[in-house]
Amino acid sequence: DTGVSQDPRHKITKRGQNVTFRCDPISEHNRLYWYRQTLGQGPEFLTYFQNEAQLEKSRLLSDRFSAERPKGSFSTLEIQRTEQGDSAMYLCASSLAGLETQYFGPGTRLLVL
Amino acid sequence: EDQVTQSPEALRLQEGESSSLNCSYTVSGLRGLFWYRQDPGKGPEFLFTLYSAGEEKEKERLKATLTKKESFLHITAPKPEDSATYLCAVQARIQGAQKLVFGQGTRLTINP
């Protein structure tokens, strides 16, 4: 059990550029979640997948954000036309259906200049 | 709307000085309440899940308790390595809902 992994760990981009983050969940976990965390705040839910189906999306997930989990394994989160307000830590978590505990990865810290 | 409020926002203790962190919540039916520890620049690390009022769980110097309106994280004789931000989150008992709603965290500093 290697835990949840995320790549890259850090990303600096210019406003208007597109960025993509990857998350690899714990191998047997069929649920995968994305959260966003800004400095001094707790994580805020963005979206979650069960297997390859995206089942819940937050109002925070604007049209510029898209998430995929094409084969029910890893997931990607893409932000198009980044804005300075997108600067945050993007956290991925995974869990096993039927067990509620979510295990988090190390996060991807995004800075939009 | 589900809501979690943690207090205090920050707490400084001397090594060995026991204290408690508070998590007050409102939720439309509680499926679970979760405590996480987060070190600077890292993802949250799972500590405890509590499901019903009266439940208690312990791990080393930490003990979590739950009532119908709040949860406490008691830290006994803390050490400097217990310094971190402690996050509380709730999950609502709603069909199909899996999201965690987090509080803003309590930043704990243990001075040697």
Image: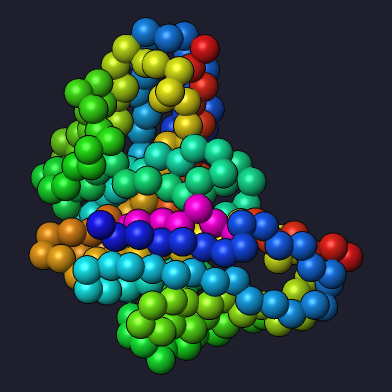
Instruction: Specify whether B111 is left or right of B59.
Output: right
Name which residue lies at 19% across and 42% down: A57
Quarter of the figure with the N terminus of chain B: bottom left
Looking at the picture, tell me which residue is in the foreground, B103 or A52: B103
Of B105 and A7, the residue lying toward us: B105
Q: Position of residue A5 (x, y in %)?
A: 43, 44
Which color scheme does this rendered protein use?
Answer: rainbow
The extreme bottom residue here reads B54
Residue B101 highlighted magenta (yes or no)? yes
Going by the image, does A33 lie left or right of B87? left
Q: Is residue B45 above or below residue B14?
A: above
- Image quadrant where residue B50 sits: bottom left
Residue at image position (44%, 70%) is: B24
Q: Is residue A7 above or below residue B3?
A: above
Residue located 56% across and 76% down the image = B73
- Where is residue B20? Give x, y as percent: 63, 76
Q: Is residue B32 left or right of residue A59?
A: right
Q: Write the start and end of the magenta stretch as one range.
A: B100-106
Image coordinates of residue A110 in percent, x first then y, are 48, 26
Vertical arrangement, residue B80 with respect to residue A48, above or below: below
Quarter containing the C terminus of chain B: bottom right
Residue B50 in sight? no
Residue B4 image offset from top left, x and y in percent: 41, 61
Describe residue B45's horizontal placement relative to residue A104 as left or right.
right
